[in-house]
Amino acid sequence: MSTCQIHERNRSWLEAMAASPDANTRLRWRNALVEVNLGLVRMVAQRQSLRSGQPFDELVSAGNLGLIRAVEAFDLRQRCNLSSFAVPYIKGAMLHDVRDNGQPLRTPRRLRELQQRARRLQEQRRSRGQAPLANEALAAELGCRSGQLEEAAAVQRALQVCSLDAPLGGEDAGEPSCLLDQLAAQGAPSWATAEAGDPGDVPQGPQQWLLTQLEQLDTQDKRLLEGHWFEGRSWKELALELRLSCRQTQQRGETLLGWLQAAAGQIPASASESAIQSAIASKAAMAV
């Protein structure tokens, strides 16, 4: 079937879906349109997988949802083809899935799958009332070396995201109660160590401090910070809103974030302390 014939078929089916008298008939037309256009999802997923390194199957699963939304949202009054209309929906669904569910670190897939197999095996034993296997016995059962299993477990621990507000184990007097307090104790910025009661001091607390910093910016710079890091909008969306090029918008936004991190405590030379200050600045942003 030629490209022109595909476009004509899609439009005729969309017209039939729009003219359907009941919801069940519309659903059947929608499902038929999604099924015959799945190749479009695979094409976009292949490009995104090569570009980002994300698993192809996971991108396809997310892209299928985007295709469904595109078919449901298509307006017959538009002169564009369904494929042209659907690609941004498909790509957007993939990017959102990577953002929301993607791993924060790139790790070998074989180790992630090994850890999943080990967890399933241990859960099956517990459901049968059997004791969990020790590391060496579990490795023998899975057909791998114990060192590989330990490496897979270490990868799993590295992928677990810990909240900065999560309470620490002990609550002894004088000890930090959460990870954020521990970071602040190692390298607190000026707003964390300022004395309450001095009228010239910066307002206490990350939220007040951040608001004070934002008030120093002009309207456009403030919008860049709020739009990208608080509202999650893309650089392209903000570029259109502010009538700038996408490259200018991204460069300016990243420069502003660097300024904000530096303002959080005049970033020290030490790399570890720099990471601490960045974490504090990010936490301040999330507090708004």
Image (spheres, helix red, strand yellow):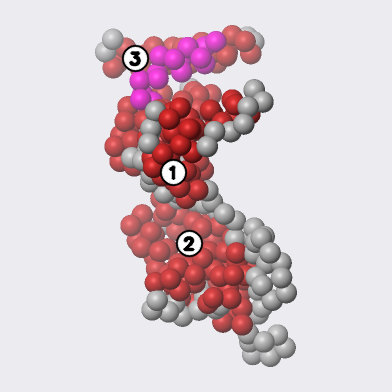
Q: Quadrant of residue 112?
A: top left
Q: Mark 2 Cα within 10 Å, few/some/many (few <14, many 20+)? A: many
What residue sits right under mark 1 in the picture?
A: 150
Q: Secondary structure at mark 2?
A: helix
Q: Pick whichever, 79 or 22, lies toward us.
A: 22
**Magenta residues, dominant SS class:** helix
Q: CA distance from mark 1 to mark 3?
A: 52 Å
Q: Pick whichever, 109 or 276, lies toward us.
A: 109
Magenta-tinted stretch:
28-42
Q: Pick whichever, 250 or 52, lies toward us.
A: 52
Q: Who comes first in sequence, dot 1 or dot 3?
A: 3
Q: Pick whichever, 129 or 288, lies toward us.
A: 129
Q: Identify the residue shown where x is 40% and y is 14%.
A: 36
Above or below residue 186? Residue 252 is: above
Q: Position of residue 211 (x, y in %)?
A: 61, 71
Q: Residue furthest left?
A: 2
Q: Secondary structure at mark 3?
A: helix
Q: Which mark is residue 30?
A: none
What residue sits right under mark 3 in the picture?
A: 6
Q: Mark 3 Cα within 10 Å, few/some/many (few <14, many 20+)? A: some
Q: Between label 1 and label 3, give the one nearer the viewer.
A: 1
Q: Position of residue 187 (x, y in %)?
A: 53, 77
Can residue 279 be seen in this snapshot? yes
Q: Position of residue 287 (x, y in %)?
A: 63, 63
User: Is 247 placed left or right of 11 in the picture?
Assistant: left
Q: Which mark is residue 224?
A: 2
Q: CA distance from mark 2 to mark 1?
A: 44 Å
